[in-house]
Amino acid sequence: GGFVFNELEHLNLCVCKKHSPTLLTQLLNDSPILRVLEISSLEDHESGKRNHFVSWKQPSLVPECLLSSLQVFKWPRYFGKQQDRDIAVYILKNACCLKTATILAQPCL
C-alpha cells in the first residue's frame, strides 16, 4: 500500500537520512516508468558525516522500472561503503535497459 508514481521519469534522491534505503526501495517499486535515477549526497545535509545509508534490503522482486525503463543511473558522490556497493551492484545487475551508468568516487574524510 502506498502511492504509485505513474509519471515519474527522473528521480534525484538524497541519501543523507536514515530512512533513505527504505525510501529508495519504495520509490523504485512505485515508479514503473522511471528512466533516470540519480543518488546524491548533499554536503549541507551531511552534518560532518558521510553517507548515512544504513543497511539496505533488496526488494523481494525486481522493480518494474529496473526491468523495463531505467536508462540512466548516476551516483556523483559515491563513497564506496558496503551498503553503497550493495545498492550500486543491485541496480547495475538488474537494470535491463540501462544505457549509461556514472559513478564518481569521493574520498571518505
Image (spheres, rainbow, N blue to C red):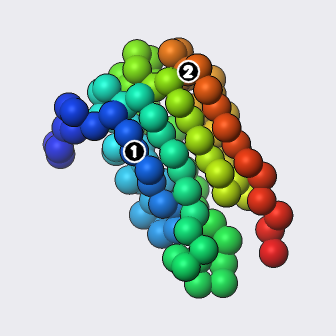
> Which image quadrant for residue 87?
top right
Quarter placement of the C terminus: bottom right
Residue at the far bottom in the pictured view: 47
Residue 73: name its quadrant.
Answer: top right
Q: Are marks 1 and 2 in contact (CB under 8 Å)?
A: no
Q: Which residue does the image show at 60% across and 74% down from the upper left?
A: 43
Q: Residue at x 54, y 50 (%)?
A: 39
Q: Amino acid at mark 2?
A: Leu
Q: Mark 2 sits on what residue?
A: 98
User: Taking 38 as reference, is 40 above or below it?
Assistant: below
Classify mark 1: helix, strand or loop. strand
- Residue 91 falls left or right of residue 12: right
Q: Residue at x 55, y 21 (%)?
A: 98
- Residue 107 in view in this figure: yes
Q: CA distance from mark 1 to mark 2?
A: 15 Å
In x, y percent, where is residue 19? 42, 63
- Looking at the picture, tell me which residue is in the foreground, 82 or 76: 76
| Label 1 sits on residue | 11
Q: Which numbered circle lies on residue 45?
A: none
When the figure is inspected, residue 28 is found, relative to residue 80, above or below; the finding is above
Depth order, front residue of 26/108: 108
Q: Amino acid at mark 1?
A: Leu
**Circle 1 residues within 10 Å: few <14, some 14–19, many ≥20:** some
Q: Is residue 103 above or below residue 109?
A: above
Q: Is residue 59 left or right of residue 79?
A: left
Where disc 2 sits, the SS reads loop
Residue 60's spot in the image, x, y percent? 43, 31
From the viewer's perspective, tell me whether residue 85 is left or right of residue 97. right
Answer whether residue 52 is visible to the viewer in this image.
no
